Amino acid sequence: MNTLITQALAIKNELIGYRRALHQIPEVGATLPQTKAYVMEQLKSLGYDPIEICESGIVATLTGRLEKP
């Protein structure tokens, strides 16, 4: 099976959990403080160092190594 599909299936339940948690936050519009806090918390728990870039914007940089053939 395709490696990407296998990896996605391995975290399927985790991703569903994130989606369900986000849908439990009753916010609408462009100002989303609870949603932003949830996303920041989850990114930090995954080892990222997220940065707030505006009222509801977040940037988290993923670094890796370049694989050469």
Image (cartoon, rainbow, N blue to C red):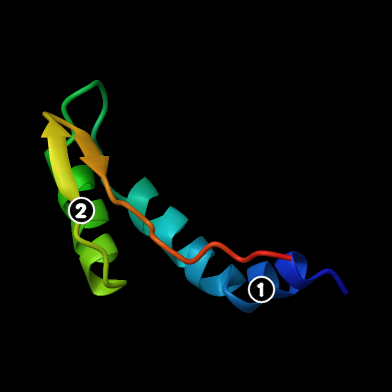
Number of residues whose C-alpha sits closer than 10 Å to that of mark 1, classed few (under 14), some (14–19) or many (20 or more) = few
The type of residue carrying mark 2 is: Pro
Give the side of residue 18 with respect to residue 16, left or right: left
The residue at the far top in this view is 29
Secondary structure type for disc 2: loop
Report the residue at 66% width, 73% height from top: 7
The residue at the far front in this view is 69
Q: Quadrant of the N terminus?
A: bottom right
Q: Residue 12, how many percent across, how many down?
A: 60, 69
Q: Residue 24, how many percent across, how many down?
A: 32, 51
Foreground residue, 57 or 33? 57
Q: Is residue 36 above or below residue 56?
A: below
Foreground residue, 2 or 35? 2
Q: Residue 52, how many percent across, how many down?
A: 13, 41
Mark drawn on residue 7: 1
Give the side of residue 13 with respect to residue 69, left or right: left
Q: Are marks 2 and 1 in contact (CB under 8 Å)?
A: no
Q: Is residue 13 above or below residue 48?
A: below
Number of residues whose C-alpha sits closer than 10 Å to that of mark 2, classed few (under 14), some (14–19) or many (20 or more) = some
Mark drawn on residue 29: none
Report the residue at 26% width, 64% height from top: 48
Which residue is disc 2 drawn over?
Answer: 50
